[in-house]
Amino acid sequence: MAALETIPVSVVTEEKSSQGKFAAEIFSSGERWMRGAAPWVVGWVLSVAILPIPGVHLSVPLWFFGGPIAAYFLYRTLHKNSRLEFDCPACHAHIEMPLPADQLPPVYIYCPKCDKGLKVDNS
Ligand SMILES: [Zn+2]
């Protein structure tokens, strides 16, 4: 089970910087593999189990290919319940926003208030 972690980050524009923090439940490599394996196994077991059932067998390709596709997207998920908190170095607004589930710092974002490009890096 992923534990809630808080990572101090620095937020940088071309000339100014500020400090902030990134909090999220970050998955380890093993947890990501297990999260990905579950829908893959379920999809393939289900596709074999429903193969002899007339009519329902038409959904076999959905389960056979849907399992690995769902596994790929779950494996790509690096964290959940994320919150990035910082004071924008350009406009000094206090910003609280999530990061996309497949990104961890260092990452480039835009300030939602002033649209300035910011680099969020581990400090
Ligand atoms: Zn700003």
Image: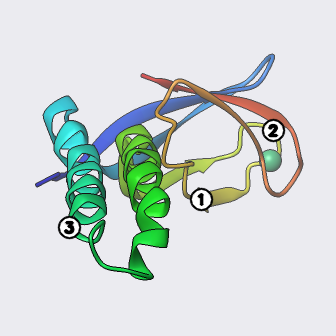
Mark 2: is the Cβ under 8 angstroms from ligand 1?
yes
Residue placed under numbered mark 2 in the picture: 90
When the figure is inspected, residue 5 is found, relative to residue 49, above or below; the finding is above
Say which label, 2 or 3, has the lower sequence index. Answer: 3
Q: Residue at x 36, y 47 (%)?
A: 71
Percent x, y of residue 120: 58, 30
* C-alpha distance separating marks 3 and 1: 44 Å
Residue placed under numbered mark 1 in the picture: 97
Percent x, y of residue 83: 46, 57
Say which label, 2 or 1, has the lower sequence index. Answer: 2
Say which label, 3 or 1, has the lower sequence index. Answer: 3
Task: Looking at the picture, tell me which residue is in the foreground, 69 or 102.
Answer: 69
For the residues carrying marks 3 and 1, which lies nearer the camera in this image? 3
Q: Residue at x 34, y 52 (%)?
A: 24
When the figure is inspected, residue 55 is found, relative to residue 65, above or below; the finding is below
Q: Regarding mark 2 in the picture, which secondary structure is present there?
A: loop
Q: Residue at x 73, y 24 (%)?
A: 16
When the figure is inspected, residue 119 is found, relative to residue 101, above or below; the finding is above
State if disc 1 and disc 2 touch (CB < 8 Å). Answer: no
Q: Amino acid at mark 1?
A: Met
Which quadrant is the C terminus positioned in?
Answer: top left
Left or right, residue 58 beside residue 120: left
Residue placed under numbered mark 3 in the picture: 49
Task: Looking at the picture, tell me which residue is in the foreground, 65 or 4.
Answer: 65
Task: Looking at the picture, tell me which residue is in the foreground, 29 or 108.
Answer: 29
Left or right, residue 87 beside residue 32: right
Q: Regarding mark 3 in the picture, which secondary structure is present there?
A: helix
Which quadrant is the N terminus positioned in?
Answer: bottom left
